[in-house]
Structures are given as structure tokens and as C-alpha cells.
DNA sequence: CCCCAGTCCTGCGGGC
DNA sequence: TGCCCGCAGGACTGGG
């Protein structure tokens, strides 16, 4: 479930590791396979051990650890991955460990219950190709109205599935797509090419408002309690959700109406049919 | 090119 | 009570 706010929280949680030196890198017990780690463990040793962490960034929903060798470790948590500097929720699903020296953290851990996540090691050119503008759109947090219209203004798709397309905008997932459209007052089935400039402006503002607030609350920890920050603490934004997982409950903007759940491209969408109009 | 369905994976909750 | 099935949705693949 980690989307932009959760991954940004992970990034901030390990940011103080900048300047630390990597003492070892380990794949943890094989009984928690499969977790794809590319390339081979030997290559990891050779290219990573002894390097210093120069910067920690984010590429959409991935944490990027930049080394002084100009290589990047990319942590892609997908559904249930966590990046931790303290003991994980369980030892069973601990997948990967970076031991550090010379900074505040002894280690950075990667834990993943379902194991859908991935970890990559890229040289700068590989990274730029992999996450270049062809593969990954502008970061949703700072995207402008002009960029939104450039990316999706001509598309005949419905807006909600389009928000999940990482080539259009990087970082939005299923939860925040519904939240953003409710704040913007846009119907999830509205076609992109039918949206007015005023609606794109509303979408831009809503995206920034929702994602920034979610970051301030350190992300959303849903009912299963999986998502945690780097210190294994829950996020708080789930208490601010307007529509997500709230089918049948009153709309926060028009309390006499109830939130509806529909399915678009095999994924749940939550919205209010009264204040999210299909027409402008 | 554009878009959608299928795939991976685990834990949980509903139904019987 | 115990079992089975469906569902949750990240990113990617294959195909219409």
C-alpha cells in the first residue's frame, strides 16, 4: 500500500544515514523467498560494501539510496514493504539488511510480509533510464496544472485510473486517488479530455493538499496495521480519510449523502455522487 | 499507441 | 470450529 506519502516518510526516516559508511549487505533467511533482488549477492558485496551514503531520495513510490560511487540502491516496497532502522514487526519477513558505521543508525532493514517488493542496484545511467520521463512522470507532490494538462489533457481515459498511471504522475496509488478526487470535487469516471482548466487546477491543488497533509501525518496505516515508519510507528492520516474504505458512511462535505464504492480497472474507488459531479 | 486483464504474494474475514 | 475462497493493490507483461 505504500504510496508517495508513506514512501516519503520512509525516506525522511532514514535520511540521517547520509554520510554513513556501509559495512555489509545481507539477504536475510531464504525461507522468506521469493523476493527478487537484482543483481547477485556477490555483485552487491563488491559494489556496495565500503561505500558512503551520499544522499537519500525518492522516485515515485521508491526510496533511492545514492552512494559515493554514483550508484543507487532502489527500495521498492510495493504492497507490504517497510524500510526500518529499528526491530521489524516480525523476524519472519525480514528480507534485507544494510549494516552502517559512522552515523546514527546501526542498520537499515527491509521487511516485507507479502514479498512483492523489490530491491535494485543501478549505475547512474541505468537509474536515469529506468526512472526517466518515459517511464516515470513528474512527481505528483510538485506537479503543476500545466504539467497535468500536458500529461493527461488529451487522454480519453477516466480520471481515476489515469491517476494510477505512474508515467502520467509519479506517486499516487489507489488510496490517495480517491481522496484527491473528493477534495477536488471531480467524479472518478470523468474523462480526462473532458476536464475543464478549472478542474485541472482543482486537481493540482487537491493533489498537493492531500499528499502534503498525509506526509505531515506520516502516512496512512490501514486496518491490517502493516504500514509503519522507519521507527515502526503507525501513521496518522487514516483518521483524516474522507472517502477511502468509507462506503455507506456520510460524505464529509454533504452529510446527508453516503459514500459509494465502485470498481474501475479492477480496483475499488470511493466517492460522493453529489459533490463529485460528472459534468463541470 | 493506448489501454486493460492477468500475474505475483500473504493474511484476513465472510460464508457455510 | 475449521476450511476455503475472495480480496487487498504495488508494477510489470502480454495482447487486443
Image (cartoon, coloured by chain):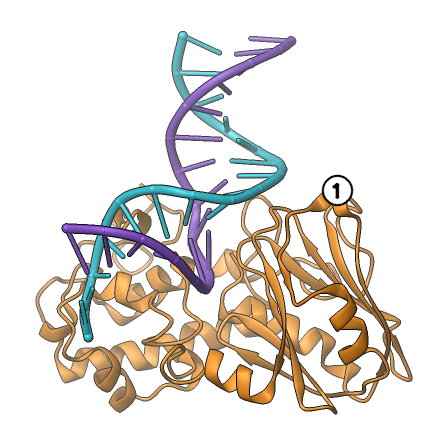
Chain colours: A orange, B cyan, C purple
Depth check: A275 or A178 in front? A178
The number of discs equals 1
Displayed quadrant of residue B6: top left
Q: Image height check: is A222 above or below A71?
A: above
Query: Residue at coordinates 47% horizontally, 83% vertically from top-left?
Result: A129
Query: Which is nearer the eye, A238 or A134?
Result: A134
> In the rendered image of this protein, does residue A193 appear above or below residue A79?
below
- The quadrant of the rendering that contains the C terminus of chain A is bottom left
Instruction: Identify the residue at image location x=13%, y=68%.
Output: A156
Visible in this render: residue A57? yes
Residue A275 as seen in the image, left or right of residue A27: left
* Residue A242 seen by the camera: no
What chain does badge 1 belong to? A
Q: Residue at x 12, y 74 (%)?
A: A193
Residue A7: x %, y % from top left: 57, 70
Above or below residue A157? Residue A138 is below
Q: Position of residue A19 (x, y in %)?
A: 81, 89
Q: Point out residue A179 in the picture as x, y percentages from the top left corner.
A: 36, 63
Lateral position of residue A78 relative to residue A175, left or right: right
To which residue does mark 1 refer?
Answer: A31
- Name the side, left or right, on which B16 lies relative to A44: left
Residues A240 and A113: in front is: A113
Where is residue A184? Give x, y as percent.
27, 71
Q: Is residue A184 above or below residue A246?
A: below
The image quadrant that residue A278 belongs to is: bottom left
Q: Residue at x 17, y 65 (%)?
A: A157
Label 1: state its secondary structure: helix
Amino acid at each position: 500500500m505504500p504510496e508517495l506519502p508513506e514512501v516519503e516518510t520512509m525516506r525522511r526516516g532514514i535520511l540521517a544515514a547520509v554520510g554513513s559508511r556501509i559495512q555489509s549487505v545481507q539477504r536475510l533467511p531464504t525461507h522468506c523467498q521469493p523476493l527478487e533482488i537484482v543483481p547477485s549477492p556477490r555483485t552487491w558485496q563488491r559494489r556496495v560494501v565500503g561505500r558512503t551514503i551520499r544522499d537519500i531520495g525518492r522516485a515515485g513510490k521508491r526510496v533511492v539510496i545514492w552512494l559515493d560511487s554514483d550508484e543507487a540502491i532502489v527500495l521498492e516496497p510495493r504492497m507490504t514493504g517497510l524500510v526500518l532502522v529499528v526491530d521489524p514487526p516480525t523476524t519472519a519477513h525480514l528480507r534485507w539488511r544494510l549494516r552502517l558505521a559512522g552515523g546514527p543508525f546501526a542498520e537499515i532493514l527491509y521487511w516485507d510480509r507479502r514479498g512483492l517488493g523489490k530491491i535494485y542496484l543501478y549505475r547512474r545511467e541505468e537509474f536515469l533510464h529506468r526512472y526517466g520521463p518515459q517511464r516515470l512522470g513528474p512527481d505528483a507532490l510538485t506537479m503543476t496544472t500545466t504539467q497535468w494538462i500536458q500529461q493527461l489533457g488529451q487522454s480519453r481515459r477516466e480520471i481515476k485510473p489515469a491517476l494510477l498511471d505512474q508515467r502520467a504522475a509519479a506517486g499516487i496509488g489507489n488510496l490517495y486517488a480517491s481522496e484527491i478526487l473528493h477534495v477536488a470535487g471531480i467524479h472518478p469516471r470523468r474523462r480526462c479530455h473532458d476536464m475543464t482548466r478549472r478542474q485541472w487546477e482543482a486537481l493540482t491543488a487537491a493533489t498537493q493538499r492531500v499528499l502534503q497533509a498525509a506526509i505531515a501525518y506520516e502516512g496512512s496505516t490501514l486496518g491490517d496495521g502493516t504500514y509503519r515508519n522507519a521507527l515502526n510507528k503507525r501513521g496518522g492520516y487514516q483518521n483524516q480519510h474522507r472517502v477511502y474504505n468509507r462506503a455507506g458512511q456520510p460524505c464529509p462535505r454533504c452529510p446527508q449523502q453516503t459514500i459509494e464504492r465502485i470498481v474501475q480497472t479492477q480496483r475499488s474507488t470511493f466517492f460522493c455522487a453529489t459533490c463529485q459531479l460528472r459534468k463541470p
